[in-house]
Amino acid sequence: MAAAPDITSKASLQRILTELEVLKGTGVVSDAEYAVMQETLNAARVKVGLVKFILTCAFSFVKKADHHLSIDAGQKFEVIENEDSDWYLGRVVGGKQVVGWVPKNKFV
């Protein structure tokens, strides 16, 4: 059985994901390349605990700020951060791999 990932592994993956965001933002990688790379890193996210759980959206939400994420009822949502009392940070499963905030009241 493999050892549990340590804090260094989690921090390393977070740095990779941050660098990937920079590469996409500067146009070094295309949206399609970015999506493939994000999908490739999904298993690593789970292994190091960056994905906490997956929910199904009950009520659609249209983003109202740049840091929000639009989501439709029925879509699955990977929760990355759950510490805020009113919002989840995560991304739509099978979406464009964009990370953003969605109100917790959109899920049951």
Image (cartoon, rainbow, N blue to C red):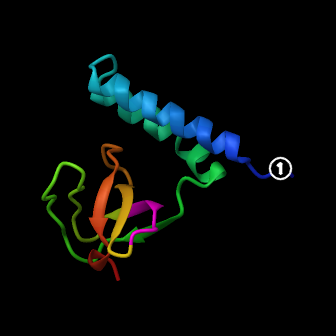
Kindly state the secondary structure of the residue where label 1 is placed: loop
Q: Quadrant of the C terminus?
A: bottom left
Q: Which residue is drawn at 45% across and 61% down?
A: 81
Question: How dense is the environment of label 1, judged by Cα within 10 Å: few (below 14), some, or many (20 and up)?
Answer: few
Image side of residue 15 versus residue 103, left or right: right
Residue carrying label 1: 3
Image side of residue 58 versus residue 33, left or right: left
Point out the residue furthest to the bottom here.
108
Image side of residue 40 versus residue 99, left or right: right
Judging depth in this view, the residue of 2 and 99 nearest the camera is 99
Asked if 23 appears above or below 10 in the picture, the reply is above
Does the magenta stretch mainly form a helix, a strand or a loop? strand
In the rendered image, residue 43, in percent from the top left (x then y), is placed at 59, 46
Q: Residue at x 69, y 47 (%)?
A: 7
* Residue 104 part of the magenta-drawn span: no
In the rendered image, residue 54, in percent from the top left (x then y), is placed at 46, 66
Q: Residue at x 24, y 51 (%)?
A: 67
For the residue marked with disc 1, what is the amino acid?
A: Ala
In the rendered image, residue 90, in percent from the top left (x then y), is placed at 39, 56
Q: In which quarter of the image is residue 27?
A: top left
Range drawn in magenta: 77-84
* Residue 78 part of the magenta-drawn span: yes
In the rendered image, residue 12, in percent from the top left (x then y), is placed at 61, 35
Point out the residue furthest to the front here.
84
Q: Quadrant of residue 61?
A: bottom left
Q: Which residue is drawn at 46% across and 40% down?
A: 39
Judging depth in this view, the residue of 82 and 93 nearest the camera is 82
Asked if 106 appears above or below 24 in the picture, the reply is below
Point out the residue furthest to the top here.
28
Q: Quadrant of residue 30?
A: top left
